[in-house]
Image (cartoon, grey):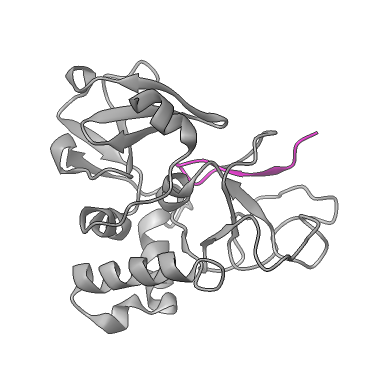
């Protein structure tokens, strides 16, 4: 039986056998001794995305009194959920992310991890712990961000923006490509606003290979 430890672009945590390309955590442990989840979805505001392997370390996931290991299809998914690159195992990516964050916010001090975590937490969940989204013109949404759009028959379905196209997200990979002609001018953006700004400034997240297969 798969554990409930896979994160969707909406930030939800689901059970699926697919593991994805990255793991991460939300600042500590919030799972029960039997490896199940209750109502909590984070231990602190430090939400990070990490590599699957680092310096030969090995862990049994969801151990008692250890942090709750989470998994992501790819980095774009992790960013949409509100996770940032880890400064330990993904130093180069984290430094690049922080540099672009500083540029978009106009203050190097705002690129420190604790400050980014505070900003991101307000942008990813509201007081009811629901996902924060915002409207935008489709043309203004950069590659690497996730959106939903009103004309979709499944209005809750997340799509990855890549150039002028949208890719349908599924737990095991991207399953279909939507042409620009089918997309409304206004979309609902799932990726937090500050991360969207970083993507607009040039950050390119790692994507699952199924994205390249669809795009040719």
Residue 12: image location, x then y, percent? 54, 43
8 with respect to 189 (left or right): right
Q: Is residue 87 above or below residue 199?
A: below
Observer able to see residue 22: yes
Residue 157 seen from this side: no
Main SS of residues in magenta? loop
Residue shown at 40% from the left, 55% from the top: 124
Q: Which residue lies at the image location 27% right of the left edge and 67% below the top edge?
A: 100
Position of residue 39 in the picture relative to residue 75 (left or right): right
State left or right for residue 104 relative to residue 121.
left
Query: Residue 23 location, x and y as percent?
Result: 60, 54
- Please state, as top left, top right, bottom left or bottom right, where the C terminus lies in the image: top left
Residue 175 percent coordinates (x, y)? 46, 22
Vertical order, 124 against 47 (above or below): above
Nearer the observer, 51 or 37: 51
Hey, which residue is sitting farthest bottom in the picture?
109
Identify whether 143 is placed above or below 55: above
Magenta stretch, residue numbers: 1-12
Location of residue 3 with respect to 152 vertically, above or below: below
Based on the displayed image, in which of its 4 quarters is residue 154 positioned?
top left
Q: Quadrant of the N terminus?
A: top right
Q: Residue at x 62, y 65 (%)?
A: 43
Q: Is residue 5 magenta?
A: yes
């Amino acid at each position: 039986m798969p554990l409930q430890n896979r994160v969707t672009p909406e930030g939800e945590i689901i059970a699926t056998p697919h593991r994805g390309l990255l793991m991460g955590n939300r600042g500590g442990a919030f799972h029960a001794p039997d490896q199940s989840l209750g109502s909590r979805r984070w231990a602190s505001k430090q939400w990070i995305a990490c590599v699957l392997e680092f310096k030969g370390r090995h862990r049994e996931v969801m151990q008692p009194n250890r942090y709750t290991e989470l998994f992501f299809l790819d980095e774009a998914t992790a960013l949409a959920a509100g996770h940032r690159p880890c400064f330990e195992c993904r130093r180069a990516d984290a430094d690049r992310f922080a540099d672009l964050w500083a540029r978009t916010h106009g203050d190097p001090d705002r690129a420190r991890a604790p400050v980014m975590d505070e900003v991101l937490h307000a942008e990813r969940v509201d007081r009811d712990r629901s996902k924060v989204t915002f409207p935008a013109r489709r043309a203004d949404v950069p590659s690497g961000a996730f959106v939903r759009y009103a004309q979709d028959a499944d209005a809750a379905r997340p799509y990855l923006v890549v150039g002028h196209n949208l890719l349908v997200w599924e737990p095991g990979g991207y399953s279909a490509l939507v042409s620009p002609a089918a997309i409304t001018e206004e979309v609902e953006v799932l990726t937090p606003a500050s991360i969207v700004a970083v993507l607009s400034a040039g950050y390119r997240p790692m994507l699952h290979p199924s994205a390249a297969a669809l795009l040719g």
